[in-house]
Image (spheres, rainbow, N blue to C red):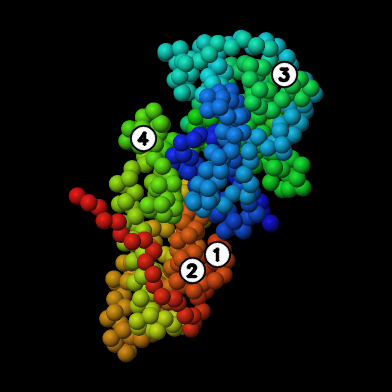
Amino acid sequence: MKTFYITTPIYYPSANLHIGHAYCTTIADAIARYKRLAGYEVFFLTGSDEHGQKIQRTAQAENKTPLEYVDPIVENFKELWKKFYISNDDFIRTSEPRHEKVVQEIFKRIQDNGDIYKGEYTGLYCTPCESYWTELQLDENGCCPDCHRPVEKVSEEAYFFKLSKYADKLLQHIEEHPEFIVPTSRRNEMINFIKSGLEDLCISRTSFDWGIPVPGDERHVIYVWFDAVINYITPLIHNPDMKKFWPADIHLVGKEIVRFHTIIWPAMLMAANLPLPKQIYGHGWLVTDSGKMSKSKGNVVDPVALVEEFGADAIRYFLLREITLGLDGNFNRDALIQRINSDLANDLGNLLHRTLNMIGKFQKKILIASTEGTDLDKSFRLEALDTAAEYRRLMDNVQLSDAVKVVWKFIGRANKYIDETTPWKLAKDETKRQELANVLYNLAESLRIVGILISPFMPATAEKIFEQLKVSSEPKLDDAEVFGLLEANHEVGKPEQLFPRILIED
């Protein structure tokens, strides 16, 4: 069986969850579900990044240990993933003993290869980003170039990783594997960053102790980013499935942390003599009309409240349809409601309700064997198959937004097919009974295919469609590429509303 391994970044345990946290994980979940649909054995990993000075300071300010501080936040993340139907196979916490063991093992392996040495670090450190910077890298205000907050001058004994040693090797790999960093804009940024010169990376601290101890020198804790990226290999390195799933097929990460994943992490793997992931995909930010979401701006959108109000599938649909992967996307409540009313209630919901209602009214819920039918019938069936084929092509190329739009274009075509064939008129003419049977069968079969195609995006809605069609088999992508799998005399269920329209107050 073909295998596929996808990861999200492990998330910093912020006490303030916002919809941006759900965005990346929803993308990864849709890809993972699609791969399972296409017959792959999938390993999907997410988790939480819990070490570092920032966590320790925050916990101390609340008179808690770091673990006491992060435990309830991590549980909130896990609950959020359940609410969003996230189908991860593992959840890694960097505070877990299994992770500590692997980090120390990788550290020792790189050290034994001669690529870690002890020295003195004097420089600039951004605690919120857990990042080291040189004077030349600071922004115009002398602050962190990523978060634009003040940096601290740090001077302490430290271990260093010979990152500079791998500059040429990294460039060669990126140039020989253009698919390694996606999209191209991120790839070009990283090429320029490497060409500007890589310095050896400080990978330990002694000024705090919330982290994984350096093996053989426990006064030092390992730099949080050296620690965190190893999570991707933690569940597999001592697992028989290591060769099956590693190297990872896709690391899905936010654009602000591409540098850690495409430069530091690959260099670490090279130093440890381990294969590099096949692709790092740097997606854009989810923003509001007032810019990138942040607590200070007061524009944070609570994902839990959204799910309770609109349902997870509606949010998933909006995120996956509206935002082109790799670009920034705007989250707007009014746009969300418009999509729910037009795409989900009017288009998909009405198609299912009208179809099942007519089968119930005109054929007592029973599908009658279809014939080849009219040219219009034949054309409609071909459009269903063309949609499935185009969907597969787009999803294989991780073009999620376009894949959603292709399915909805066909849903629109199916609604138009109803208006063109006028089943209510055919039902009044006894000589048109077979013509009516063909139309209703084609509509039911198109809904079966639609249910399969939307299952990676809207898993709960797909299940409802299958329940109302009374289709019990596990959906497979191959079954969406065949028209006519519903058998004659198949009984459909009672139509129920998928998405109620949302009334908008003036």
Residue marked by disc 4: 299
Instruction: State the image coordinates of residue 160 (x, y, percent, origin top left).
Output: 69, 17
Q: Is residue 180 above or below residue 382?
A: above
Task: Name the quarter where the N terminus is drawn.
Answer: bottom right
Residue marked by disc 1: 475
- Report how far apart the C-alphas of labels 1 and 3 lie in the structure: 54 Å
Amino acid found under the numbered disc labelled 3: Arg
Name the side, left or right, on which 120 lies relative to 18: right
- Earlier in the chain: of badge 4 and badge 2, it is 4
Instruction: State the image coordinates of residue 424 (x, y, percent, origin top left).
Output: 29, 79
- Earlier in the chain: of badge 4 and badge 3, it is 3
Name the side, left or right, on which 377 lies relative to 269: left
Instruction: Look at discs 4 and 3 and give the one toward the viewer.
Output: 3
Amino acid found under the numbered disc labelled 4: Asn
- Earlier in the chain: of badge 1 and badge 3, it is 3
Badge 2, how many Cα within 10 Å: few under 14, some, many 20+? Answer: many
